[in-house]
Amino acid sequence: MKTVDTGREAESCACTYLQQHGLSLLERNYRSRRGEIDLIMNDGKYLVFVEVRYRRGSTFGSGAESVDGRKQAKISACAQYYLQQYPHAASRPCRFDVISISGAREPRKIQWTRDAFPALG
């Protein structure tokens, strides 16, 4: 399976998981010149920007651990752009979540880190 296909599958898995936990999808693969956000979702009063990470194994750490400062800054900049494009969303509290999916076969382990990092920039 190609990396792109694996990424899409992980994002679909994450989206389904979050919807099962009460979130609703607003945008998928939101792109701007500043970067990309995998999922943008509603969670009650919160607008949630979700980064999805998949790791087949744990040799190089978890997916959540791979969301370093550089990646956080890109996600944050893209989220700021989104909020500029949709001013009605800017009045809502926002948070950044990370979904880490691991395992080469079913059942995969899913780790949801709410409020994984603060907005940067």
Image: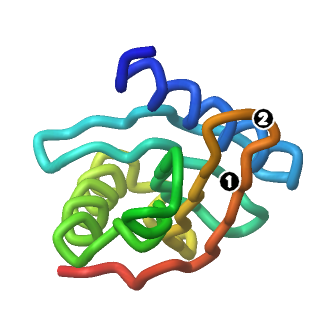
Tag 1 secondary structure: strand
Q: Is residue 30 left or right of residue 94?
A: left
* Label 1 Cα neighbours within 10 Å, binned few <14 / some 14-19 / many ≥20: some
Q: Which residue is mark 1?
A: 42
**From mark 2 to mark 1, how far is it between C-alphas?**
27 Å
Going by the numbered disc 2, the residue's amino acid type is: Glu
Q: Position of residue 26 (x, y in %)?
A: 59, 38
Name the residue: 36% across, 25% down: 3
Mark 2 and mark 1 lie on one chain; the one further toward the N terminus is 1
Is residue 68 placed above or below 38 in the rendered structure? below
Q: Position of residue 84 (x, y in %)?
A: 28, 55
| Colouring used for the render | rainbow
Q: Which residue is mark 2?
A: 106
Going by the numbered disc 1, the residue's amino acid type is: Asn
Are the residues tagged 2 and 1 within 8 Å (C-beta)? Answer: no
Is residue 93 placed above or below 55 in the rendered structure? below
In this view of the protein, which residue sits in the foreground, 70 or 46?
Answer: 70
| Total numbered circles | 2
Q: Is residue 34 left or right of residue 40?
A: left
